[in-house]
Image (tube, rainbow, N blue to C red):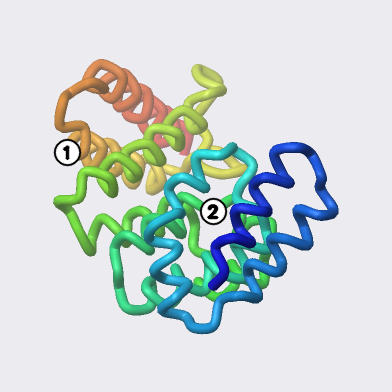
Amino acid sequence: MDTKLFENYIALQNVGRKKEAKKAIEAFVQSFETLPEKELWVAKHLENLAMGGTGGIRHELYAGVIFPALLHCYQGQDPWSTMWLSKTIQNLFSAKYLWEKIEFKSELTLAQEAYKLDRQSSEIRACLLEILISGFEYCEHEWPAGLLCGPDGCSPLECDETLDEIELARTLDEENRLTGYLWSFEKKVQVYKLRLLSES
């Protein structure tokens, strides 16, 4: 790999020279000769790249270097790579041909897989907790009209699954920062489940 090409890409990107930046990043991707070389670069740089914005990582770099490295390690059941596939889900959403290679697994499913592989990692625990809370916030955003577990609301079974996820969130929230929120949300799920059962 030629790291100077990446430095050149960053410099061009910073001054808004988009066409030249595109050529530079394409040249950088082409400069990798082996998969282990990609894996080493990704392990060193991915966290900084991901912090650069919310819109995902530049496609050429993700498709040509990052995803192949993550996929290979994911297939070997590496928890860090599994977590990062979850964290880079926006890139997968916009590149279905890549997402297909991991069977269109969701952000939550990937984070759960990473947690099963390494339950002690604080980074993986924080990642999974953040995704769970985001899901809970979506679920309750139309309350008290109802809860949303999908486009058609929540079924009693989905309420039970959500209650299980709340228990998981409690175990991940080691500092008990979310105790009040989780208690409040749990009550809503229980009330909504009773409402559904009384209507059936």
Q: Is residue 150 above or below residue 88?
A: above
Q: Quadrant of the N terminus?
A: bottom right
Q: Earlier in the sequence, mark 1 or mark 2?
A: 2
For the residue pair 101 and 191, the one nearer the viewer reads as 101
Q: Amino acid at mark 1?
A: Thr
For the residue pair 186 and 82, the one nearer the viewer reads as 82
Residue 130 at x, y = what percent? Answer: 37, 36
> Is residue 107 visible in the rendered structure shown here?
yes
Secondary structure of the residue carrying numbered label 2 = helix
Residue at 56 percent of width and 22 percent of height? 142
Give the farthest residue toward the right: 19
- Left or right, 152 with respect to 114, comes to right
Q: Amino acid at mark 2?
A: Ile
Residue at 65 percent of width and 75 percent of height? 30
Residue 16 at x, y = what percent? Answer: 79, 39
For the residue pair 106 and 40, the one nearer the viewer reads as 40
Residue on which disc 1 sits: 171
Q: Is residue 73 above or below residue 109?
A: below
Q: Is residue 20 above or below residue 129?
A: below
Give the farthest residue toward the bottom: 34
- Disc 1 crowd rating (10 Å Cα; few below 14, some 14-19, many 20+) is few
- Left or right, 195 with respect to 114, comes to right
Residue 27 found in image quarter: bottom right
- Left or right, 129 with respect to 100, comes to left
Residue on which disc 2 sits: 89
Secondary structure of the residue carrying numbered label 1 = helix
